[in-house]
Image: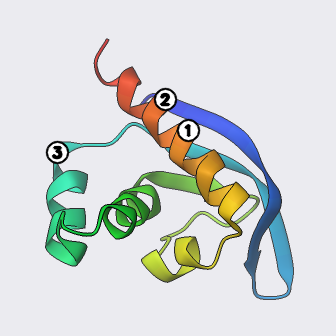
Amino acid sequence: MKTVTGTLKHGLKIGDQTHHDYVMREPTTADLFDAEDEHGTGTPLKFKAALIARTLVRVGTFEGPFTFSMVRGLKPADFMTLSNSYAEAEKLGEG
């Protein structure tokens, strides 16, 4: 499994802890179908958030599963960071 790592500026709050470092894996075809089943492709941000939730492996010490609601609760800068990492992880699967 190929992965991308990074750091969230504001972090993801889980319980009373805020986590910043993350690991994201390359997406699978199943991830694409599952995200489409959950939110369709007519709402691109929701579709992207669903994909991000499926491909996150770990944020801080939390190893998932991650939900759409967790991704939706991020600050916009952190969502963009994960979105950029998703694009990078997607390219890993093309090699």
The residue furthest bottom is 15
Q: Nearer the viewer, mark 3 or mark 1?
A: 1
Residue drawn at x 46%, y 76% is 67
Disc 3/disc 1 C-alpha distance (Å): 18 Å
Give the x, y percent position of residue 10. Answer: 83, 63
Rendering coords of residue 56 (x, y %): 51, 54
Whichever of callouts 2 and 3 sits on the residue coming sooner in the sequence is 3
Q: Amino acid at mark 3?
A: Thr
Give the amino acid type for the residue marked by disc 1 in the picture.
Answer: Ser
Residue 29, labelled with which disc?
3
Label for residue 62?
Answer: none
Nearer the observer, disc 2 or disc 3? Answer: 2
Q: Residue at x 31, y 64 (%)?
A: 47
Task: Give the CA separation, mark 1 to mark 2.
Answer: 5 Å
Asked whether 6 or 3 is in front, the reply is: 6
| Position of residue 76 measured from the top left corner of the image (x, y, whole percent) | 66, 63
Q: What number is the disc on residue 88? A: 2
Q: Are marks 1 and 2 in contact (CB under 8 Å)?
A: yes
Point out the tag, 3 or 1, that comes first from the N-terminus.
3
* Residue drawn at the location 52% of the way across and 47% of the way down: 83
Neighbor class of circle 3 (other Cα within 10 Å; few <14, some 14-19, many 20+) is few
